Amino acid sequence: MPHFFIDSKNRIDDIITISDEENYRHIARSLRSRPGEKLLLIDENQIQYETEIQTIDSKTIQCKIETSYPSKRDLEFDLYLAQSPLRSDAQLTIMEKATELGVRAVYPILTDNCALKVNKRDKWQKVMYEASKQCERAKIPTCYDVTTLDEVLKQEFDRIIVFAERSTETSLKKFLGENPVKKGDKVLVIIGPEGGFSPREFEYFRNKNLPLVSLGDLILKAETAVIVGLGDIIYEYQG
């Protein structure tokens, strides 16, 4: 069922009116939807509405609510990703998959071996928006401007995990076994570029007492490490 974000102010009783240009164009023009078809809508309060299209005119779509309920498409803890941007489609894949895996926000960070020095925040945010629609997320994650680790670490997190395959101190499973993620925790995952972190950056992590954690003996591409790392954290929490 197609999924779209709406504003709760556009609901009156059991009717939701869609009038914003982007949603209207997608539903009426791209999907060529017709009265009688179903739409899944979600508002800023994370309430999902299963609806049926009643009318479509030249500017608006009216949908009748059949049922509504709080969305369950969310993690029980806040997961954040600080990651050194990659070139081309690899970075778009990271933004899409991080969204599907429930991150609250992504911090693109400049590192010594960073492959991409330009800020493509608007493009990355759009990918996260579209991915949120596809996987029925209740809340769209945020992509911040390109920044530094120093700036990110000015915030407070309950757990910080640095994935560093070649200079690891412990496995992710062992680390989470000794430092389990709890409901409501803020967890920051830090992943470097294709070339890995520099010696200076490893010294930086050690000086800040940040754990250097491994995903196993295999050497993973950066985009693969994002998917595996975030997925394993979620698995260990749910397990």
Image (tube, helix red, strand yellow):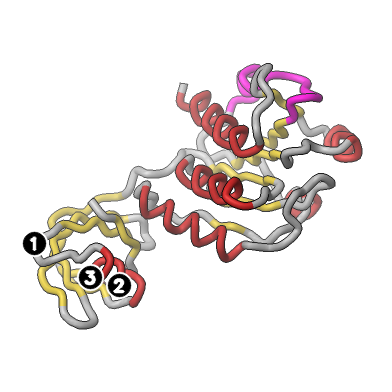
Judged from the image, the secondary structure of the residue bearing numbered disc 2 is helix
- Whether residue 154 can be seen here: no
Q: Which residue is mark 1?
A: 36
- Compare residues 118 and 46 and report the one nearer the observer: 118
- Compare residues 38 and 16 and report the one nearer the observer: 38
Q: Which mark is residue 28?
A: 3
Disc 2 to disc 3, C-alpha distance: 5 Å
Q: Is residue 165 above or below residue 14?
A: above
Displayed quadrant of residue 49: bottom left
Examine the structure image and report whether residue 58 is included in the region drawn in magenta: no
Crowding at dot 2, Cα within 10 Å, few <14 / some 14-19 / many 20+, comes out as some
Three-letter amino acid code at the position of disc 2: Arg
CB within 8 Å, label 1 to label 3: no
Magenta stretch in the rendered image: 164-180
Disc 1 to disc 2, C-alpha distance: 18 Å
Examine the structure image and report whether residue 171 is included in the region drawn in magenta: yes
CB within 8 Å, label 2 to label 3: yes
Residue at 35 percent of width and 49 percent of height: 136
Q: Mark 3 or mark 1, which is nearer the start of the sequence?
A: 3
Residue at 69 percent of width and 39 percent of height: 191
Three-letter amino acid code at the position of disc 3: Ala
Crowding at dot 3, Cα within 10 Å, few <14 / some 14-19 / many 20+, comes out as some
- Compare residues 220 and 19 and report the one nearer the observer: 220
Q: x, y percentage for residue 44?
A: 38, 62
Q: Is residue 101 above or below residue 114?
A: above
